[in-house]
Image: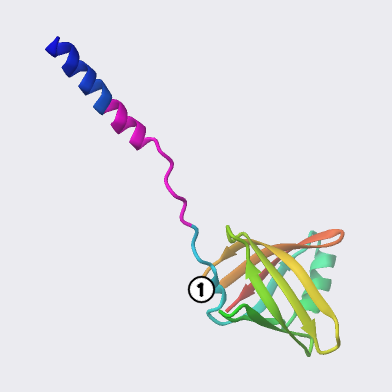
Amino acid sequence: MKNLYRAFIGVTVISLLLFNACTPEDVIVEDLSVKLTKGSWTFNSVEAGSDFLNSGYEITYGGNVLSFSSDGTCTDELLGVNGNGTWSLSGNQDELTLRITYDDSDTRNEVWRIISITDTELRYKFDISPNTLEMTYIQ
């Protein structure tokens, strides 16, 4: 009987250890806002699907400078027109939402799908119908 009891305890302990080893770990999502708010971002390149579209968007965004503040506000300098607005990252930090109003009363309400943010490069995709643009900004 003692051997049966010991075997039961041994199987129970091993089962508990295996069960605990198989539980999912918490996924830690890096806080990208730290890198985003580090400084100003200057337009570097665009991939729009063709050389013709790339050239057009490079002219449109050339010289564009974006700045994001830790308080959720942002500025955008685009072709000599200044804009002020707000920004926010989604909970899993794969989308950046912008709402900017410019001096000429134009507005920019966009959701960017984040590809990557490093200390020196911001890459994202967003749609300007019928195109999807992949944009790169650098610090």
Which amino acid is tagged 1?
Val
The region drawn magenta spans 14-28
Left/right of residue 129 with respect to residue 92 in the rendered view: right
Q: Position of residue 56 (x, y in %)?
A: 84, 72
Does residue 94 sit above or below 74 in this rendering? above
Q: Is residue 120 visible?
A: no
Q: Compared with residue 105, is residue 124 higher up or lower down, i.e. above or below? A: above
As rendered, which of 129 and 28 lies closer to the eye? 28
* Residue 24 as seen in the image, left or right of residue 52: left
Q: In this rendered view, identify the residue nearer to me: 23 or 43.
A: 23
- Which residue, given by chain and number where applicable, does mark 1 sit on? 34
Residue 105 horizontal/vertical position (percent)? 86, 85
Vertical order, 49 against 7 (above or below): below
Q: Quadrant of the N terminus?
A: top left
Q: Quadrant of the C terminus?
A: bottom right
Q: Is residue 97 above or below residue 38?
A: above
How far across and down, in percent of the image, does residue 84 sit?
A: 72, 85
The total of numbered circles placed on residues is 1
Residue at 78% across / 90% down in the picture?
Answer: 80
> Is residue 59 toward the left or the right of residue 43 in the image?
right
